[in-house]
Amino acid sequence: MLLYKIFIDPFVQMGASPDLFVQTLWEGLVAGVLYALIALGFVLIFKASGVFNFAQGIMVVFGALTLVGIYEILVRWGISQENVAAFLALGLTIGVMFLLAFAVERIVLKPLVNQPDIILFMATFGLTYFLIGFGEYVFGGSSKVMIADQLYLPKGFIDLKILGGVVSLQKIDIAAAVIASIMVTGLALFFSKTRIGRALRAVADSHKAALSVGISLDQIWVIVWFASGLVALVTGIMWGARSEVSFALEVIALRALPVLILGGFTSIPGAIVGGLIIGIGEKLGDFYWGALLGRGIESWLAYFIALVFLLFRPQGLFGEKIIERV
Amino acid sequence: MLYREAGQFKTNYASDLAVFPILQDRMGIAAILLVAFVAVPYFGNDFLLQAIMIPFLIFSLATIGLNLLTGYTGLLSLGTGAFMGVGAYACYKLETLFPGVNIIVWIVTAGFASAAVGVLFGLPSLRIKGFYLAIATLAAQFFLQWCFVRIPWLFNYNTSGAIEVGTHTLFGIPITGPNATSTTRYLIALSIVVVMTWFASNLVHGRIGRMWMAVRDMDIAAELMGIRLLPTKLLAFAVSSFYCGVAGAMLVFLWYGGAEADVFSINQSFFILFMVIVGGLGSLLGSFLGAAFIFILPIFLRYVPPHVGMSIFPATVEHITFMITGGLIIFFLIVEPHGLARLWQTAKQKLRVWPFPY
Amino acid sequence: MRMKALIIAAAIGTVAGSAFVATASAEDTIYVPLFTYRTGPFAVSGIPIANGMHDYLEMLNQRDGGIGGVKLAIEECETGYDTKKGVECYETVKDKKPVMINPYSTGITLQIIPKASVDKIPVLSMAYGLSASANGTYFPWIFNAPATYWDGASVFVRYIAQKEGGVDKLKGKKIGLVHLDAPYGKEPIPVLEALAKDYGFELVLYPVPAAEMLNQSSLWLNVRRDKPDWIYMQGFGAMNPTAVKEAAKIGYPMDHLIGVWWAGNEADGVGAEGKGYQSLSFTNIGTNFPVIQDIMKHVVSKGKTQTTKDEVGLNFYNRAVYNAILIAEGIRNAQKLTGKKVVTGEDVRRGLETINLTEARLKEIGASDFAPITRVTCEDHNGHNDAFLVQWDGAKWNKASENIKPITDKVIPLADAAAKDYAEKNAGWPKRTEACDKSS
């Protein structure tokens, strides 16, 4: 009976209502792309500076809050055109994220250069504390509504009548998937084709060697922190539009962790593929097998998926092979 | 000058290998223990004991536990909160199944349940390293937390879904539950922590500790020297989880007096890890300093403004506390990346040569 | 550089340490601490609650000079909805002789419940905390008026029975419970299970782990597959707006989604998308009540608070005002019972136990039609009062139903059994020794 429920029943269900199956796949895909986006924020920083950035979650909150906060201030100042205000706010927020990247590099990273990874990890925790306090001090703790309409993000949904049922695609999800894909490809191209990208990869290989050929570590670090600040901002906009803009958004960053172990800490394609595997895997798992275990299994399912992969490839799917010499 | 060891001769190997080879250190430890056992409970009020000292001791113990794993063996774990939870729930189950046995026995025994779970989730450590392992232990964190909520047997089918602590006595004096005074609970916690710290100290100074450190420094080299990796790593997981489990049981039984699963969330794990790092990896003293820094500092900061006559809104105080704590963490890491324990060593060195610069 | 830095750090430490001494509160005031959370991930709900409680008590100070001529010393302690900080707050306020504690977090309430009788400080957990603590015989120091979560869930069942056209029509219906996967969220399960057995409906549970609050898409896919006829939501914080948005996304009929009273924040309606979503409530919304007008006049317009004008009258704000009314009423009764001006926690426990907010009394304090008629007795610390539904119209909440009685003949025996169970499981739980006063 149990075996039937595990091995037969879910597939019967998939066959019986293919529209739900496709819908689940779609939800998994969207979630996967968004997870990939968050993971990308981690990967960029880890690759360039070896820092496991604990503050990524709070940067998501900070980015989203800053955007809405600045927007509200602009509207109060009398910019009547909502769209103009929204895009102005977006521009200013990008500026703030740059300042943040710059400050982090100057105040936190530079004095800690060449310290063990775990110390830098700890420093980002200090940064998290600071940003929580600062963000709440400036913007207050109450929730805000993401200015999705003003940013021309689409609303509504498309119903596809296929497979004897309905598959409903949210326009905002499509937009999220498209924007995330563009960002991911853009960043991937930027870091593989441009001069800065090559410099970044050199830094990732060896700080000392990169320094000796004249690459400015400071500059690279500001750029990657800025890039991952942008990623955080986009993540904040997308998840903010799905729920609300408040400090609860911070937990979203945790979603990226199984993606990271699966895809590898240092690989951009890994983050994408890992995100998709985790996204689709956990949606399918929770939808078809979740009831067996009393539901709510999504919180740890992703980690187990990742763990299984990890036992075969300890450095993640796309991570660089760890070579140790005695 | 102040801290001079001249004239202290060691005449046998035992005294040379002692944990505290210097007289001043021994006197210092004696003084600290005296203060902790006599002065604090005698002069401290409920606030000091209940809101500061008891949690400080409990977090110190959990920090020691994680430090054995992360600091001494070099295995990063983010499952501390869950392992603490295993201890707490195990103690709760044992206590309700066998109410006749003294609760202190169960608090300590609960550590074994935690150790067993720790070994199970430590198995991947043979193949996985560094941050990858840290995130793999997150599987333990989320899975166990889910169990605490989803398996009603663990909380005796309470409708509230939380575990509550009844009154238990030792020699007729209540030591848990609402009737136990904070002084009694403090003394129990202190005794457990002192004994377990002493044990940990012996462990890390002995053969096992050296094996752990060899594995930390380079596990392949350690293997070549004949240290079997799997048992060594698993032992580290077991001992570490044991400490965390006892700390978790103490957290619920000697401090909160009742808890829901949320207490053992991922935030708890991070909290303990940061105590380890700020205090100093691979240092027992650092575990205490780290716990003090991360836990007590914000409490201090919160009480500064009202007591120097500033009337700031409590929420604003909270924001500023967060900012200052964050700033101080970064500041201390920049000043001394190896943790507060290293600062103490530096200070000791300075005291040794004082008043001369070197 | 290093030494200098150390010295600075040491200096800061000393200042902090020397400032760290307890101060005694003045004798001629009544000390009312409020545990609030204006920070942290749940601040969204915490801010209006903190404002409402503070503003009503401050209004009493401004308008009447306190209660019975004694000023109230109102102090907020920030918990951030964190149990650790809650313990710290409790220890901070304990020595200042508080007349009662309002923990405002289920985790903190659980932690304080056993201590209340020892420290002689009553606990008022208004419509949250432990449902079983409604029983005054087992929990003489705990009050959770005006209704428990179990009452709430039974009001929901009675409401859908009305809509379906009778209790017998519930047979064979499918009812979902979307809940936070934590003790708070699981509260309504026992009562809903009992009712499912009696009325023959099927109960389907949809737990939301706390870490997945913002990530509910697969849960709602399950809802889409199972097609429950009605959904009750026991959610909190960011979980609610996410759930409402997801429900809208799968095209679930919004008026069939009904939240508990803590799922009725203005942020939970999420604008136009959540139009039709309903939530339970027991206090009315808006500013059109004498008591709210007084707060506007004496507190808000004088700038004696952080509350802005448009925050007054929101759902949680008004509920918190009602909470503060209970506080004030408890203190007032205590003064009447003892004849003392400055009352203690023990007196206020008696005062709370004799709360009798009749229609006439509500009118006197300007809360007629604003707050529910509430009666607390020695045996019943809750009242198991009526609740009604409010509906989100895309911009604000509107009252959407008459008062609905909870199914008390189910809820009260359950609560009593749970209270007994709690006392038995906690070895050495004290028997009630407190005498019972006549209702005022």
Image (cartoon, coloured by chain):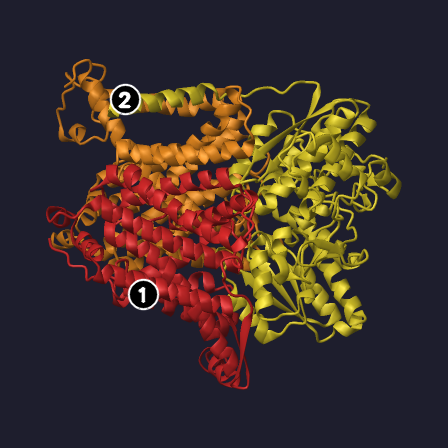
Chain colours: A red, B orange, C yellow
Q: Point out residue C209 in the picture as x, y percentages from the top left corner.
A: 51, 58
Q: CA distance from mark 2 to mark 1?
A: 49 Å
Q: Quadrant of the N terminus of chain C?
A: top left
The answer to whether B40 appears left or right of C143 in the picture is left
The answer to whether C228 appears left or right of C79 in the picture is right
Q: Quadrant of residue B228?
A: bottom left
Q: In the rendered image, which residue does mark 1 sit on?
A: A185
Give the label, 2 or 1, closer to the camera.
1
| Residue A307 visible in the snapshot | no
Q: Quadrant of the C terminus of chain C?
A: top right
Which residue sits at x=37%, y=69%? A277
Q: Quadrant of residue A305?
A: bottom left
Q: Point out residue A89 in the picture as x, y percentages from the top left corner.
A: 46, 49
Q: Point out residue C148 in the picture as x, y percentages from the top left corner.
A: 71, 51
Which residue sits at x=46%, y=38%? A133
Q: Quadrant of residue C222?
A: bottom right
Check the residue under mark 1 and report the chain it is in: A
Q: Secondary structure at mark 2?
A: helix
Of residues A139 and A206, the one nearer the viewer is A139
The disc label shown at residue A216, or none:
none
Q: Amino acid at mark 2?
A: Lys
- Asked whether the residues under the numbered discs 2 and 1 touch, taking CB atoms below 8 Å apart as contact, a structural biologist would say no
Q: Point out residue A77 in the picture as x, y percentages from the top left corner.
A: 54, 42
Of residues A44 and B333, the one nearer the viewer is A44
Of residues B6 and C62, the one nearer the viewer is C62
Residue B228 vertical placement versus C49 (above, below): below
Q: Secondary structure at mark 1?
A: helix
The disc label shown at residue C4, or none:
2
Q: Amino acid at mark 1?
A: Thr
